[in-house]
Image: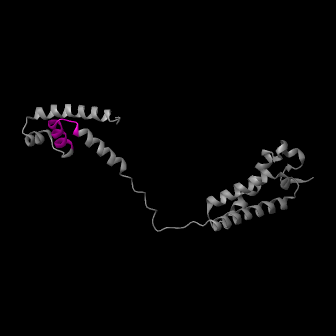
Amino acid sequence: MGPAVRGIPRGPSRRDGAMGKLEPDLMRALHDEYAASLWSFALRLTGGDRGRAEDVVQETLLRAWRHPEVVNNSTQGSARSWLFTVARRIVIDDWRSRQARPEVPMAAPPERGRSDDTDQVLQGWLVGDALRTLSAAHREVIVECFYRGQSVAEAAARLGVPEGTVKSRTHYALRALRLALQEMGVSD
């Protein structure tokens, strides 16, 4: 039995348990010996894509780890040819799978789904029903300050009441509105 990879003896003692996987020192030697040339080869096969080339090398060495009989029972040259053949087949398989499921390039990203206004409409109905339960004076203050966006001074001038009255009516109107909504089953 000669060396499988420079300086690492091959044979049944070089396996890790029942799984038949290569020991770490043999894998390290295999990586050190072939990874650079394998990466250059994969880089050419992938059209210069460094990331894909690294993935191909990693997958190739993983397959060598899973099949130690190829490394253990081969000469120096045939381990190399096995690794390069596996790398080439990985690239071909990847290319074929992309051909079977091609990506469809689009000029623009797909439209986003439009939001459904149902919740907003239902909330508007609930608030409208709750507003109808308020007294006329409280309802007027809420409409002026919140729906028309008036300041306290503007609402007071429009309603013909002092500013302090607008503030107190707003406070009590909001409390009554919260209570009415809670009675309808709407939580905070």
Residue 134 on the magenta segment: yes
Q: What's the image's color scheme?
A: one colour
**Image height of 113 relative to 127, above or below:** below
Residue 142 on the magenta segment: yes
- Viewed as shown, does residue 133 lie left or right of 21? left
Question: Mostly what secondary structure, the magenta segment?
Answer: helix
Where is residue 89? Give x, y as percent: 74, 64
Task: Please state which of residues 174 and 9 is positioned toward the viewer in this rendering.
Answer: 174
- Quarter occupied by residue 123: top left
Q: Residue at x 20, y 34 (%)?
A: 173
**Image height of 160 relative to 104, above or below:** above
Residue furthest to the right in view is 1
- Quarter occupied by residue 147: top left
> What range of the chain is rendered magenta?
132-146
- Viewed as shown, does residue 86 lie left or right of 14? left
**Count of marks placed on residues:** 0
Task: Please state which of residues 180 and 44 is positioned toward the viewer in this rendering.
Answer: 180
Where is residue 177? Give x, y as percent: 25, 35
**Image height of 12 relative to 178, above or below:** below
Where is residue 84? Give x, y as percent: 76, 63
Where is residue 56? Give x, y as percent: 69, 59
Q: Quadrant of the C terminus?
A: top left
- Viewed as shown, does residue 64 lie left or right of 44? right
Q: Residue at x 66, y 57 (%)?
A: 54
Q: Residue at x 89, y 49 (%)?
A: 11
Q: Residue at x 7, y 41 (%)?
A: 157
Task: Please state which of residues 150 and 4 is positioned toward the viewer in this rendering.
Answer: 150
